[in-house]
Image (cartoon, helix red, strand yellow):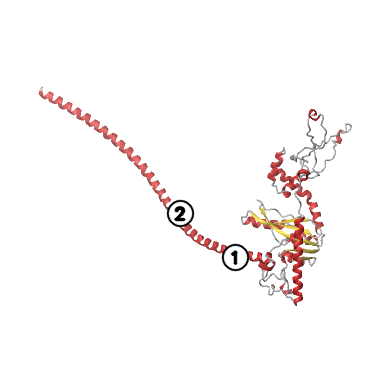
């Protein structure tokens, strides 16, 4: 019995040990599975780390190249800063020299009579008198000129217009609308009218737009239905559809060129009068107007060219370049030059260029004719004068297109320098300053005001 009990205890212990071993085995299996999952995760992490390392290596190489480029750019920028500083210094020096030369030129040309001189004109400041009688005569002439100047000044001071009274403020040609402001009948009873007081108040009424409806009746011949419909012929119009009268064009031209109002402001002005006209529409009306009045401008140009003496000058205007190069028109002699100049400007990435507006005015015909060119080439005066068989004298500055026009016109046109080119004093043919003698001192020749000379 004791052995059986012992065997039972041993059996129970073995079962407990087996259960413990089984639990340990299960726990070890779970740990192995966990280790396997961890190994897989570690492998994926290692792959990701390897990819990140490769990317970091590429980034490091790129950063190294960028750093090297930045260093080179910094060195280049430092060199450019030095060059720009030197250029700035040179430009400041040139600017100061130009200012000094301009101040000296202004003193020479527009200073007091005693201060006007030309440093390279020998003996200019010397007044050559042959005798004492000449000196006394010059002194008397100066005193007489001073007295005449004083008398003219006094006369101008006395003839100044007095301030107008309130009754003269408004011109007589303005229409008047009278309003009688009177007492009531009860208040006037027993009174006698002895006079009246009048006050005038200026009123303003903005422009009024109106629409003219043109009705074109249609007619048919009942006996001949195949004859079609008949209407009165429609007159020619400024734009297609006859939607805008020439009065609209006249207002646009006057506002733009007479009062310097841009088209977008006139667009707002029309809107304030009750109708919205898009800017594109107004520009189309202006373009149509230019084509319409072209024969009239040509006629005025022909009239000016009948004057035997013309004055001319040019001024620079900024021309905004179009997106596309204009084509060459065989009927327009200017189109070739326009094509060349704008093509070169667009090729150099310019957004604008300095064009020229030329003016021609007759000495005896008081008309100003303006001619636009895209550059200051000599073909501007040549097209306006030589190509139109002009014969006479051209007054202008010493620009090469003017000075050489006599040769280009085979002697038909003679160039005469304007008064701004005349010297303060000429003592001999070799000392005369102007177009012929300007080569030694070109800085003394500047473009003068043709209008003042004319």
Q: Quadrant of residue 64?
A: bottom left
Residue lying at the far bottom in this picture: please name it. Answer: 131
Quadrant of the rendering where the C terminus is positioned: bottom right
User: Residue 81 appears at what percent x and percent y?
Assistant: 51, 60
Could you say which is closer to the camera, residue 163 or residue 76? 163
Q: Position of residue 446 (x, y in %)?
A: 68, 64
Image height of 402 relative to 70, above or below: below
Label 2 neighbourhood size at 10 Å, few (<14), some (14-19), many (20+)? few
Mark nearer the viewer, 2 or 1: 1
Residue ID for mark 2: 66
Sequence-wise, the earlier of marks 2 and 1 is: 2
- Residue located 36% across and 44% down the image: 46
Which corner quadrant of the image does residue 381 belong to? bottom right
Q: Quadrant of residue 206?
A: top right
Residue designated by label 1: 97
Local secondary structure at mark 2: helix
- Residue 31 visible in image: yes
């Amino acid at each position: 019995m004791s052995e059986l009990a012992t065997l039972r205890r041993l059996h129970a212990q073995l079962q407990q040990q087996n259960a413990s071993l089984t639990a340990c085995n299960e726990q070890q299996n779970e740990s192995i599975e966990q280790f396997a999952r961890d190994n897989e995760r570690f492998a994926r992490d290692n792959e990701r780390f390897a990819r990140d390392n490769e990317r970091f290596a590429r980034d490091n190489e790129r950063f190294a190249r960028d750093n090297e480029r930045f260093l080179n750019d910094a060195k280049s920028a430092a060199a450019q800063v030095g060059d720009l500083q030197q250029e700035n210094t040179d430009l400041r020096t040139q600017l100061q020299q130009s200012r000094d030369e301009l101040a000296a030129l202004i003193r020479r040309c527009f200073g007091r009579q005693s201060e006007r001189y030309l440093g390279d004109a020998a003996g200019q400041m010397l007044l050559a008198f042959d005798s004492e009688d000449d000196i006394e005569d010059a002194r008397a002439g100066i005193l007489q000129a001073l007295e005449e100047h004083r008398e003219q000044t006094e006369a101008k001071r006395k003839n100044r217009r007095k301030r107008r009274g309130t009754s003269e403020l408004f011109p007589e040609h303005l229409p008047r609308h009278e309003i009688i402001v009177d007492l009531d009948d009860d208040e006037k009873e027993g009174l006698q009218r002895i006079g009246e007081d009048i006050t005038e108040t200026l009123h303003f009424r903005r422009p009024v737009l109106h629409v003219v409806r043109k009705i074109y009746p249609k007619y048919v011949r009942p006996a001949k239905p195949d004859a079609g419909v008949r209407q009165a012929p429609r007159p020619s119009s400024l734009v297609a559809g006859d939607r805008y009268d020439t009065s609209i064009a006249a207002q646009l031209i006057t506002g733009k060129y007479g009062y310097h109002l841009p088209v977008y402001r006139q667009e707002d002005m029309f809107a304030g009068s009750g109708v919205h006209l898009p800017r594109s529409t107004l520009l189309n009306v202006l373009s149509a107007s230019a084509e319409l009045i072209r024969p009239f401008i040509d006629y005025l140009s022909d009239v000016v060219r009948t004057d035997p003496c013309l004055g001319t000058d040019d001024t620079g205007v900024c021309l905004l370049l179009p997106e596309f190069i204009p084509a060459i028109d065989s009927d327009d002699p200017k189109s070739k030059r326009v094509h060349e100049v704008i093509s070169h400007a667009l090729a150099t990435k310019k957004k604008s260029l300095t064009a020229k507006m030329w003016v021609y005015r007759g000495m005896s015909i008081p008309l100003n004719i303006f001619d636009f060119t895209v550059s200051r080439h000599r073909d501007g005066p040549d097209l306006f004068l030589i190509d139109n068989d002009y014969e006479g004298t051209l007054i202008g500055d010493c620009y090469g297109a003017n000075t050489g026009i006599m040769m280009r016109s085979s002697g038909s046109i003679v160039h005469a320098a304007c008064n701004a080119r005349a010297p303060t004093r000429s003592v001999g043919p070799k000392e005369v300053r102007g177009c012929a003698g300007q080569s030694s001192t070109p800085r003394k020749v500047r473009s003068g005001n043709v209008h003042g000379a004319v």
